[in-house]
Every structure is written in C-alpha cells, then in structure tokens.
Amino acid sequence: MIELITVVLLAGAVLYHSIGIPLVGMAIISALTSAFFFIYFLSRKGLVTGLLIGIVLFLGAVTFWYHSNTVTQTFFADRIITGTIKSVDRRLDKTLLVVRDRQFDQLIQVTIHSQNNFLPGDTVKVYGTLQSPQDFMTNTGRLFGYHDYLQSKGIVAIVPIASVTLVSSGNFSLTRFATTLRFHIADIFTRYISFPIDGLAAGMLVGYQGGVPAGIQDLFRTTGVLHVLVLSGENITLLALFLSIILKPLPFKLRSFLTGAAIILIVLISGAGVAAIRAGVMGIIALTGGLVRRSYVPLRALTLSIIFFFFLSPETLFTDPGFHLSVLATIFMIVVVPKIEPLFYWLPEAYHLRELVILAIGVPIFMLPYTMYFSGLVPSASPLANIVMAIITPFMMLGGAIVLACSWISPIAQIVGTTVSFVGDVILKLLAFLNTWPQLNTPPLAWWGVIAIYMIFFSLVFRQEFRQSWYDLTFDVRSTVPPPPNSSEPESR
C-alpha cells in the first residue's frame, strides 16, 4: 500500500507542476477518482481505496504548491551580504559557500577562488553581485535547468565572483564537525596518496568529490561509472559490515545505535547530497527494522525515502538528476533483478559474477529512457567498465580506510597509499582506453515519454500482481466470492 501511496502522491505533483492543472482542477479530479473507485467496485475496500487515492492525489498537488510559494524573490544587484554559512563545498579551483542572508533570510550560493578555512556556522560578509541562476547547455546539447535545480535546494541567487571576509567563527554543530572531518580526510589522502588518485579515494570511500579534477570526472561520466564516486547503498553496506565486525562484542542495540550514528556522519561527511541521503535513509530503516524485530523490505524503504524527500523538497524529485539515477538504479536492483535473474542461470554465482553481469548489462538498458531524456550519451564501454569498477572499488575503499586508520603510523600509511596510487593509475589508464570506444548519441525523449515507458514496463513485469490487486478491490473481505481467474477448484461431485 505504501508503494501505491507514493505513486499517487507523485502523480498529483506531476499533474499540478508539469501539466499545469490548478488546485481547483486537482480537487475535482481527486473527487472524481474517489467516486470512480466506489461506483466501479461497489465494495467497502473500493470505497476506502478510492478515498485514500483521492486525498493523496490532492495532497501531492497541495504540497508542491505550498513549497513553490515559499520561495521568495530577491533583489539582484551589487550588495554587501552579512550571513551565516550553511555549507561549504571545497573544490580544486574554487569553493562554493551557501550563505543564509540575515537581512532577507534567503540562501545564496557564493563562489570564491582563493584558499580559505570557512566552515558551516561562521558569520561572514560577502561583497559581490547577486545574479539569478541561468540554465545552460551541457556537452551533449541538452538544456540543464540549473535555476530549478538550485531552487529545489532553497537557493534563490548566486554570486559567481565574490570577496568574503570572516566576521566571527561559529559554534560546534554536527554539520561543522562533519565538514571539518571531510577536509581532514582529504588532507590525509593528499599526504599519502598521489594526485589525482587521492580525490578518487575520497570519492569512493566517503563520497567527497572535491578533490577530483573536472577532466577525471568527465572520464568517469563518459564511461558510465561516475556513480562510484558518489556515496551509495554499496558504501553504506560496506560500512555497516565493517562496523558489525569491529563492534561484535557489544550488545545488539548499542551496536545498531553506533552503526546508525556512523551512517548519519558519513552522509554528512559526503556533503549530504540527495543520493547519499537516500542511501542513508534506507540504511537507517534497515537498522530500525532490526531493532523492532521487523523484516527489512528494500522497496518499502525506498518508497519511504522518496516520501521523505517529497515533503522535504518536492522540487528535488523533478530537478535533481542525481536523485533520479539513484532511485532508478535502486529500483532495478531490488525489483527487476529478482525477475530476470533466472534468465542468467547459465552464469556461475561464484564471487557474485552473475550479479555483476546482470547489473553491468541491465542497469544501462533499464536507464536508457532517462538517459535519452537527460544527456543522450550511451557509452558502449559502460558494461565492461562497471564490471571492472565493481571488482576494484571495494579494494580502493579498503586501502583508503587503512590509510586513514594508520595515518599516525607514517610508514604503513605511505606503503598502503603507494599501493592505492598504483591501483588508481591502473583504473585511470583502463578508463582512458575504454573512453576511446564508440559512444551512442540517442535522440531526445520528452519527460512524459520517460514516464510512459516505465509505466508500460512495470505494467508488463507486474501484470499478475496488478491483476490480483484489482480483483481484491472488487469484493469485500467478508463477502463470499468466486475464486480469482486462473485458480483451480475441485469439481463438486
């Protein structure tokens, strides 16, 4: 049922945001939907389901309307802004600060091109020109809605070139601590791992991409393996497994609490991107299920994470490609893979080879409709690159963890760091070779086409489940009904 609620909630937002149906029209559609279910099924379950669908459909539209109307306008001009830093994204050539303007209580993204030691919570003065974020064309010729992307994060303006001075340092906070730890990890990798492999290690281990050059990011993107540099469910799983071994002597509840705290911390260290938060929410749900002795259902955890994001920032579900790719990949792994795995029976299960091949081949095909909409770039080397990275990434993560743990023992950290640097160089050379393979540029596909394709796909894959659910709505639980279609019943004598 939670899956149905999520789909209907998103449908309401799509009808209001993308189709442009006003709230009055959404109220009429919701009422007609509830009436249809009751008239068609003529059952108590049909009535309750119809009312639930109608209410949730209207709630999706109202939620998006409320969030879109909370975005305030700002004054674009030369200004001196006094505000508090909310986040710091340090990169090789610049630093992006998100500052809350005290005068207008708005979030502004500030870009500085000098070395700095700013942290969340610091009060700063910003000198620069406020501008409205502009959409831009990507390398593949697709328009990226940068304005809506920033607006989904609450950012209403940017200062592309700014001078920033510190007014006062902030107090301790979890975000400030996580940011300090992120930069400390990056500095340790810089000392013991050669450039630019130090940035790759930080990306694979904690999802921090601030030390990865733009050219290397493009190399990972054009070979279809950029996701390995983002904190994902795999990182969360490896972290939980590692902590379960270390904390095994502790009581189960304490072990679960410490693991949950570690998951939250690593999400903050990564920069708290949407993919990282999605993975973290699913990880916390899994831990909570163990504490309350409930079985963990991945699809239910995914839908809960989507609902969490929807009420936090519904614009994210429409504008953030990282969230889209993360959700689609997770849906493929937990929903589609069990359906198609029997077709690959001829592959051995040893060393998870069958799973690696299914993911490497299946994920690019499953994401093809979205790829046609977003970038149109389909690397032919993606399956092979994903298989190789799935094998190498855990060793890179383990090497990075050892460097961090042994950073106070310089000889050990240096030896392990040299090994990680060598493996990283091999990865870059291999990806550079795979990048020479042909790349397919697909024709553009509209957003409604993407939705239609996935709706048809899931309707075919789960047609039996949909048919059974539709049949169950026709009758009340207590009523005497004939058996559903395709069921066998002994003949009466």
Image (cartoon, helix red, strand yellow):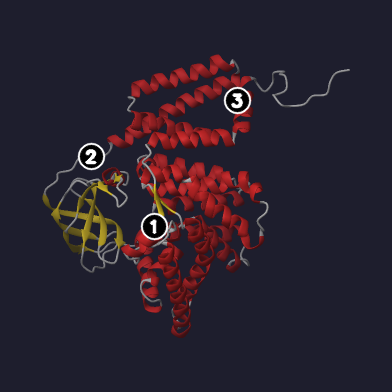
Residue assigned mark 3:
470
Q: Secondary structure at mark 1?
A: helix
Query: Which of label 1 and label 3 is nearer to you?
Result: 1
Residue extending farthest right:
493
Q: Quadrant of residue 147?
A: top left
Q: Is residue 29 above or below residue 121?
A: above
- Counting residues from the start of the chain, the first of labels 2 and 3 encountered is 2
Residue visible at 74% across and 27% down?
Answer: 487
Q: Amino acid at mark 2?
A: Thr
Task: Tell me how far mark 1 sits from mark 3, CA to CA.
Answer: 42 Å
Q: Quadrant of residue 184?
A: bottom left
Disc 1 and disc 3 in contact, CB within 8 angstroms: no
Q: Which image quarter holds the C terminus?
A: top right
Residue visible at 58% across and 62% down?
Answer: 241
Task: Tell me how far mark 2 sits from mark 3, CA to CA.
Answer: 44 Å
- Counting residues from the start of the chain, the first of labels 1 and 3 encountered is 1
Query: Which of label 2 and label 3 is nearer to you?
Result: 3
In percent of width and height, residue 10 lies at 43, 34
In percent of width and height, residue 232 lies at 47, 56
Residue assigned mark 2:
72
Residue extending farthest front:
438
Q: Amino acid at mark 3?
A: Trp
Task: Tell me how far mark 1 sits from mark 2, CA to CA.
Answer: 35 Å
Q: Which image quarter holds the N terminus?
A: top right
Q: Is residue 195 above or below residue 322?
A: below
In percent of width and height, residue 200 lies at 41, 67
Query: Which of label 1 and label 2 is nearer to you?
Result: 1
Residue assigned mark 1:
221
Mark 1 nearby-residue class (10 Å; few <14, some 14–19, many ≥20): some
In percent of width and height, residue 475 lies at 64, 20
